[in-house]
């Protein structure tokens, strides 16, 4: 299983700071792909929120390399990753966030607050785009942290982003631009920027924070 990924973290102009913080870490452990992707938005907290978002992602990256990867390296302990991830997230202040931890064929998806998460795949040989959060959780989103674990399927693609990312772009357009089953890292970045720039033209948010990856 291979994972192709990239991110976008952009701000239109210099007057407004980008309130989001983005994580995309990808390494191999015993020939297995391990990935940590996360988007955290601190806009609700103003200047303090921006600081909190950046501080949160910095600490989560440190946890990934110092604790998570060594644990995944020991197969018998890898299954504890979701529990320790939840503990780590709850130990820090944070506003809206969405993310996924992947190790081999296993994943743990987590989210809190107002975020966007989309799943792209094929069903009956037809491309489709679905709300990932609605698929994985059977209750309305609130302020609590939600986590779920499962098995990752080949051929899917996932977008996690700030809630306002591409708000003026339809899911059909997102599907046509992003869900290219042979796109690699640089091409993914190019397509994310293309969507964001078009969204700005249509009156969308002046900042962007998003991660997209596909499983091949």
Image (cartoon, helix red, strand yellow):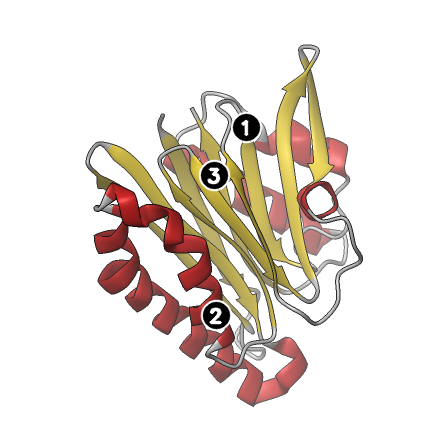
Q: Say if residue 183 shows up in the picture.
A: yes
Q: Residue furthest top?
A: 125
Q: On screen, 42 above or below 102?
A: below
Q: Mark 1 sits on what residue?
A: 156
Q: Position of residue 182 (x, y in %)?
A: 45, 21
Q: Earlier in the sequence, mark 3 or mark 2?
A: 2
User: Residue drawn 47% across and 38% down?
Assistant: 213
User: Residue drawn 21% across and 54% down?
Assistant: 70
Secondary structure found at label 1: loop
Distance in Å between CA atoms under marks 1 and 3:
9 Å
Q: Residue furthest front?
A: 76
Q: Mark 2 sits on what residue?
A: 89
In front of the other: 108 or 99:
108
Q: Position of residue 93 (x, y in %)?
A: 52, 81
Q: On screen, 180 above or below 97?
A: above
For the C terminus, give its image quadrant: top left
Distance in Å between CA atoms under marks 3 and 2:
22 Å
User: Residue drawn 58% across and 33% down?
Assistant: 178
For the N terminus, give its image quadrant: top left
Q: Say if residue 26 shows up in the picture.
A: no
Q: Which mark is residue 213?
A: 3
Q: On screen, 57 above or below 193?
A: below
User: Residue drawn 67% across and 70% down?
Assistant: 144
């Amino acid at each position: 299983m291979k994972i192709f990924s990239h991110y976008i973290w952009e701000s239109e102009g210099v007057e407004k700071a980008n309130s989001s913080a983005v994580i995309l870490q990808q390494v191999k452990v015993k020939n297995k792909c391990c990935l940590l992707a996360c988007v955290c938005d601190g806009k609700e907290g103003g200047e303090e929120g921006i600081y909190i978002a950046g501080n949160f992602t910095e600490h989560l990256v440190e946890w990934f390399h110092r604790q998570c990867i060594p644990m995944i390296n020991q197969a018998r302990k890898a299954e504890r990753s979701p529990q320790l991830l939840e503990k780590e997230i709850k130990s820090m202040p944070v506003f809206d966030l969405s993310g996924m931890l992947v190790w081999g064929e296993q994943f743990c998806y987590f989210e809190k607050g107002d975020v966007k998460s989309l799943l792209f795949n094929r069903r009956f040989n037809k491309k489709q785009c679905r709300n990932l959060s609605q698929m994985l959780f059977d209750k309305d989103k609130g302020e609590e942290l939600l986590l779920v674990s499962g098995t990752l399927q080949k051929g899917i693609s996932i977008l996690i982003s700030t809630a306002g990312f591409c708000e003026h772009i339809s899911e059909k357009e997102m599907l046509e631009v992003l869900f290219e089953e042979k796109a690699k890292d640089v091409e993914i970045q190019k397509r994310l920027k293309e969507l964001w720039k078009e969204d700005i033209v249509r009156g969308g948010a002046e900042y962007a924070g998003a991660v997209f990856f596909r499983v091949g």
